[in-house]
Amino acid sequence: MRPDNLLYPAPRGLYCEKGDFYIDPIQPVERALITHGHADHARAGHAHVLATRETLDIMRIRYGDGFCGASQIAALGETITVNGVTVRFHPAGHVLGSAQIAVEADGTRIVVSGDYKRRPDRTCRAFEPVRCDVFITEATFGLPVFHHPDDGAEIARLLMSLRQFPERAHMVGAYALGKAQRVIALLRQQGYDEPIHIHGALAKLCEYYQSEGIDLGEIRPATLAGESRQDLAGAIVIGPPSAFADRWARRFAEPLAVFASGWMLIRQRAKQRGVELPLVISDHCDWAELTGTIREIAPAEVWVTHGREEALVRWCELQGIPARPLHLVGYDDEGE
Ligand SMILES: [Zn+2]
């Protein structure tokens, strides 16, 4: 079977006609296979959802029990047949529960990697390279200029700042699913054992990570109810990036704005957001990891989804690997 007969971009997302399912559709559909719980990939309202147990749990936490009509758990590595098409979920190393989805029919295998990274991350399973005819990759940081530094060194800069400015509350902006828990786990890994304060928007997901055996140490709500302003001086407060733009953040002691994102490599972005301490910590691959992964998997063809498609497509062509951009819409690479 020709790969583009097996899976092709349709207005609502990547569609498998033979299996009559979508992968990460951006609008409600009859049957959806979901790679991971980030809001631009996992939307509510599908009639039937197939995803890992963790992704289904995360969707339930975010959208409530009625997030879909019926759900089915895909165990990692398990072979599942959907209308005659074989699908298999493999870890993607992006956030807890994240998976690549291998779609196979008539001897043709396409791997949809969703979002993925190659760095070690104690909060999720490591990316597993899967041999395939077509590898579908994102390209959020698909330019040679993107090089993500060592995440341990970035966290060490945060700890250094805490020692330097003990009178200031260190307000760390981090996305609620994945990044926040990873930042906390990295702090614990470096021996930081003070309580870490979190914005209410992170509470349920942090609790869920902990219930899945990921040790985040002592987490406290950053509500300040009945506490004096000074109480959080010298403490770490983690919240979604949006929370730091509003009055919530200004209640703390001399707030020092920190932001953990791959985008913090771009000084202009940090400046625009008023970030004093940008931490380059990403849940996506940088350029070397994207190209290294394609070399390792050595697919016959590469399709590139969202991000900076053109440079990666060009790189593949220079390596003699046919590649094309899919121009999928509706995926937000800011939310990394
Ligand atoms: Zn994602």
Image (cartoon, rainbow, N blue to C red):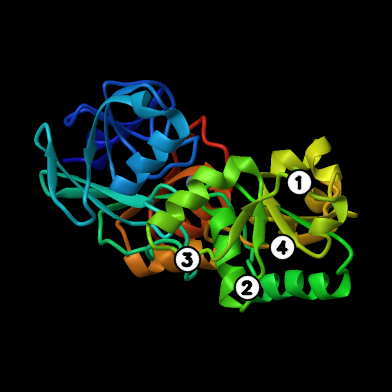
The quadrant of the rendering that contains the N terminus is top left
Does the Cβ of the disc 1 residue fall within 8 Å of ligand 1? no
Q: Which residue is mark 2?
A: 193
Residue 161 percent coordinates (x, y): 82, 71
Disc with the residue nearer the chain's start (3 vs 2):
2
Q: At 49% across and 69% down in the image, what residue appears?
A: 119
Measure the alpha-carbon separation of dots 4 and 2. 20 Å
Q: Which residue is mark 3?
A: 215
Given residues 50 and 213, the one toward you in this image is 213
Secondary structure of the residue carrying tag 3 is: loop
Mark 4 residue type: Leu
Residue 318 percent coordinates (x, y): 48, 61
Q: Is residue 20 left or right of residue 126?
A: left
Q: Which residue is mark 1?
A: 224
Q: At 63% across and 73% down in the image, what residue appears?
A: 193
Disc 3, disc 2: CB below 8 Å? no
Closer to the camera: disc 3 or disc 4?
A: 3
Residue 279, labelled with which disc?
Answer: 4
Q: At 63% across and 54% down in the image, what residue appears?
A: 220
Given residues 303 and 63, the one toward you in this image is 63
Label 4 packing within 10 angstroms: few (<14), some (14-19), many (20+): many
Q: Is residue 246 left or right of residue 72?
A: right
- Above or below, 267 against 334 in this view is below
- Above or below, 296 against 56 in this view is below
Disc with the residue nearer the chain's start (1 vs 4):
1
Mark 2 residue type: Asp
Secondary structure of the residue carrying tag 4 is: strand
Quadrant hosting residue 214: bottom left
